[in-house]
């Protein structure tokens, strides 16, 4: 779909983090994600950008992974992909 293509594009350019990617894909609001993950909204806002997401703790990654029903390694792989594309 166009939405997925757009999100993938933004993700690879490093304009959004994988958290924002899944949040949009799952149609979750900040409040819903906060409630489901048990992470403060202010913290999630920081994690929506790649430079903020890098600072997420292992515990936070596990919570996000559980909410989005993905492996924590999937979330981490997005960081590796972004750092690779930034080197080019």
Image (cartoon, grey):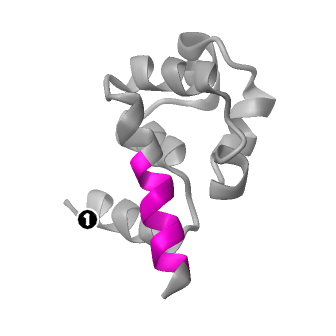
The magenta region covers 77-86
Q: In the rendered structure, does residue 18 fall within the stretch colored magenta? A: no
Q: Check the image and report above or below for 76 versus 36.
A: below
Instruction: Residue 86: give x, y in percent of width and height.
Output: 55, 78
Instruction: Residue 85: give x, y in percent of width and height.
Output: 46, 77
Say which residue appears at 38% left-offset and 36% top-offset: 73
State the residue lying farthest toward the left.
Answer: 1
Give residue 14's quadrant in the image: bottom right
Say which residue appears at 41% left-offset and 30% top-offset: 72
Q: Quadrant of the N terminus?
A: bottom left
Label 1: which secondary element: helix
Q: Check the image and report above or below for 56 versus 46.
A: above
Q: Is residue 38 or residue 28 the one in the foreground?
A: 38
Q: Check the image and report above or below for 81 versus 56.
A: below
Report the predominant secondary structure element of the magenta stretch: helix
Q: Residues within 10 Å of mark 1 (few under 14, many from 20)?
A: few
Give residue 44's quadrant in the image: top right
Q: Is residue 45 or residue 83 the one in the foreground?
A: 83
Residue beneath disc 1: 2
State the residue lying farthest toward the bottom.
Answer: 88
Instruction: Residue 45: give x, y in percent of width and height.
Output: 72, 40
Instruction: Residue 42: give x, y in percent of width and height.
Output: 80, 31
Q: Is residue 32 or residue 65 the one in the foreground?
A: 65
State the residue lying farthest toward the right.
Answer: 42
Q: Check the image and report above or below for 59 versus 61.
A: above
């Amino acid at each position: 779909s166009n939405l997925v293509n757009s999100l993938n594009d933004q993700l690879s350019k490093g304009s959004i983090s994988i958290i924002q990617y899944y949040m949009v894909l799952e149609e979750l609001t900040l409040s819903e994600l906060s409630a489901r993950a048990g992470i403060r909204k202010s913290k999630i806002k920081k994690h929506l950008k790649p430079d903020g997401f890098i600072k997420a703790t292992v515990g936070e990654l596990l919570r996000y992974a559980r909410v989005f029903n993905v492996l924590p390694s999937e979330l981490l792989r997005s960081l590796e992909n972004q750092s690779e594309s930034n080197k080019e």
